[in-house]
Image (spheres, rainbow, N blue to C red):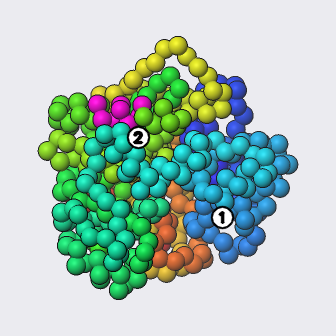
Amino acid sequence: MPGGIDGLMVGKKYIGTKFVFKYLVPRHKEEAVWSEKILAKRDLVYYDLSSSKLSMATLDFAALVKKSNVLKKIRAAGITHILSGHAVISSLENWARKNKLTLIAPDFKLVQNLENKLWFDNFLIKNNLPAPASQIWRFGQRKIAIKSPLVLQEPNSRGGEGTYFISQPAKLKKLFKAKKIKKGRRYLLRQFIRGTAYGITIFIGRDSIALSSLRVQCYGRQNKNNQKEFLGVQWVASQNLANKLKKTANQVFYVLAEKLRQNGYFGYANIDFIVKDFKVYILECNPRFSSASVQLLLFPENIGRLNSAQLFLEDLLINKTSSSFQFFGLPQSNFKGANLYIATKDKQRIQNYYQGGVYTLVNNKIKFIDPDITQLSRRGRSFIFYSDTQPGEILPKGVIIGWIISNFPLYNHSGEINSYGKIIVKHFKY
């Protein structure tokens, strides 16, 4: 599976006989215990970590191949292709190529470019796509030509790391003194747009482009380093969006998708953007699975009612062609589910264990229903809980130890965790 539940979702949502899925699971770890409850044992391929002290919560697939015998097990099982929920980085790409394995992912060189914020900002400018005013900036070497407030980003940062909110240029000196930025290094400096932060998934196929429903991005308070903690996302029902915004989003993201397609990109592209006065300002592109992928695959109403898992595999592996082309704009969906992370606040020893699977929240009480996450329905208040951790593991600060994926809202209109979200977070104590 590795990387948690995205690979599982694609496998179970693929309809056809062209591909046979096997699931890589770490022996004696929670992921294996959970997988055995919902998958046939013949479909599981067990591998062993190099140390029992390693936690799956801290390992992406690139690290996993270095700290396990997973390659030996892959070869023994006759596996030729790997689908990982984690980002594909250089070391993983090199490992796959060296061992004659195919990563089921978009073109690696293009992915690298898209994840580089300087490259992507230039891509937006060249294609006349809307984005905040920006400049490439080095500390102490170039004057700031854009108005405050500002956002400073490291070119290859991910999540909230490497992103700083600056009220005025003088604050940049404080970041330098705190060793958060380095002299001579290139950064992307943008004007901060005071608007609503959204996310959208674009599926770019060989004969189709489909836009997902929009998601509001929810953040915690700004810390002393001028960074904001990313809490999760909440899907927005179509009826709650202004028609003017829908029209603008359809136009902007169709053009973006078509430009990506012309550059040879096929697959899922997750776009972060800001909306102010019904105008869209594109921020960045994450060319991989996202925290919202499970809801996208479980509930096709969120992306043109397409089986995008099937299209994803066929477009990347079969290179099918078609004389027809379809565009699926923002869907008419009333889905209002959300995602919420539970992370370590400091260095922490894990003390408790909770089953992974589907839970319900009824009368403020949480009840476990089913280990199979594909059984999450639209009825009632239900959510998926999933964790890679086990009691006794010692984890550093900032590690995600639990994912909450719901079919109902977990945030209020201000982007703060609502009463239901607080009940859930309080229940899963580690």
The numbered dot on residue 15 is none
Range of magenta residues = 251-258
| Residue type (three-letter) at the residue carrying disc 2 | Thr
Is disc 1 placed on a helix, strand or loop?
helix
Q: Is residue 267 above or below residue 322?
A: below
Which residue is found at the position 74% from the left and 49% from the top? 97
Q: Is residue 262 above or below residue 142?
A: above
Q: Position of residue 345 (x, y in %)?
A: 41, 76
Q: Is residue 177 above or below residue 410?
A: below
Q: Position of residue 249 (x, y in %)?
A: 27, 35
Q: Is residue 73 something that shows in the picture?
A: yes
Q: Nearer the viewer, residue 280 or 378?
A: 280
Give the quadrant of residue 166.
Answer: bottom left
Give the quadrant of residue 218.
Answer: bottom left
Q: Position of residue 311 (x, y in %)?
A: 55, 28
Q: Position of residue 139 (x, y in %)?
A: 35, 75
Q: Marks 2 and 1, how far apart in space?
A: 27 Å
- The magenta stretch spans residue 40: no
Which residue is found at the position 35% from the left and 62% from the top? 136
Which residue is found at the position 37% from the left and 51% from the top? 121
**Residue carrying label 1:** 63
Main secondary structure of the magenta stretch:
helix
Q: Is residue 427 something that shows in the picture?
A: no
- In the displayed structure, does residue 119 sit left or right of residue 17? left
Local crowd size for mark 2, using a 10 Å CA cut-off: few (<14), some (14–19), many (≥20): many
**Residue carrying label 2:** 201
**Outermost residue, bottom direction?**
177
Give the quadrant of residue 337.
Answer: top left
